[in-house]
Image (cartoon, grey):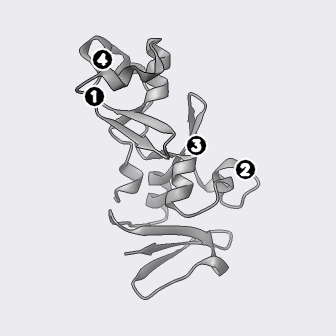
Amino acid sequence: MSHLPNKLNSFWLWREVYAKLGISNPAYKYWKNTQTLKLNNKYVFIQKSTLPSKYEHIEEVLTDLSGFLPIKYASDQLHVNEHLFSYDKMSLHREFDYKFVEDVKFVNIKKFFKENGIIVSKNSVIQLAKLKDLEITPDATFYNLKNDYGIVVYN
């Protein structure tokens, strides 16, 4: 499986961590051994098993984000309008699984890739679009989806 759908497998959403612990938002900046990941300059994630020991107990109740990405980040990575993941009336909206964590909407990219046999290497560029809008090059892999959509993986 590619790097993109597995990006958050070992991370917790910081917003959920601090809400459940009742601590201040920037507290993670002072935790020396806690690794963070920031996506879209908006979402902060804390690497699993790196919380300070006095807060480790919270990991049992945090939401597993394996295979999921915030819809804004997913839309940027797939070069598609965010509306695809936001509105039920969009053709492919129902093809994805979603979850909300602290008012952040996540889309399950891993499940979608697996169900459609989409293989992506770490440095590939991915484009999800209507068939008429896709540019298929000789070094690209094309995947035909439902409702006149397709994915092109540029290697």
**First in residue order: circle 4 vs circle 2:** 4
Between the C-alphas of marks 4 and 3, the distance is 27 Å
Whole-number angstrom distance, CA of label 4 to CA of label 2: 37 Å
Residue at which label 2 appears? 87
Where is residue 149 shown, x and y percent of the image?
63, 71
Q: Can you identify the residue that label 3 sits on? A: 98
Say which label, 3 or 2, has the lower sequence index.
Answer: 2
Q: How many marks?
A: 4
Q: Position of residue 131 (x, y in %)?
A: 63, 77
Considering only order in the chain, which callout, 1 or 2, is on the residue closer to the N terminus? 1
Q: Amino acid at mark 4?
A: Glu
Q: CA distance from mark 1 to mark 4?
A: 12 Å
Q: Which residue is mark 1?
A: 34
**Residue 45 numbered tag:** none
Tag nearer the camera, 3 or 2: 2
* SS category of the residue bearing label 2: loop
Task: Please give the name of the residue rendered at 38% of the width and 66% of the height, measured from the top-left corner.
Answer: 120
Residue type for callout 1: Thr
Instruction: Describe residue 66's horizontal placement relative to residue 81 as left or right.
Output: left
- The quadrant of the rendering that contains the N terminus is bottom left
Which percent across, then down, holds residue 18?
45, 19
Q: Which residue is mark 4?
A: 56
Relative horizontal placement of residue 135, taking residue 58 as reference (left or right): right
Determine the secondary structure under disc 1. Answer: loop
Image position of 153 with respect to 55: above or below: below
Marks 1 and 3 sit apart, C-alpha to C-alpha, by 27 Å
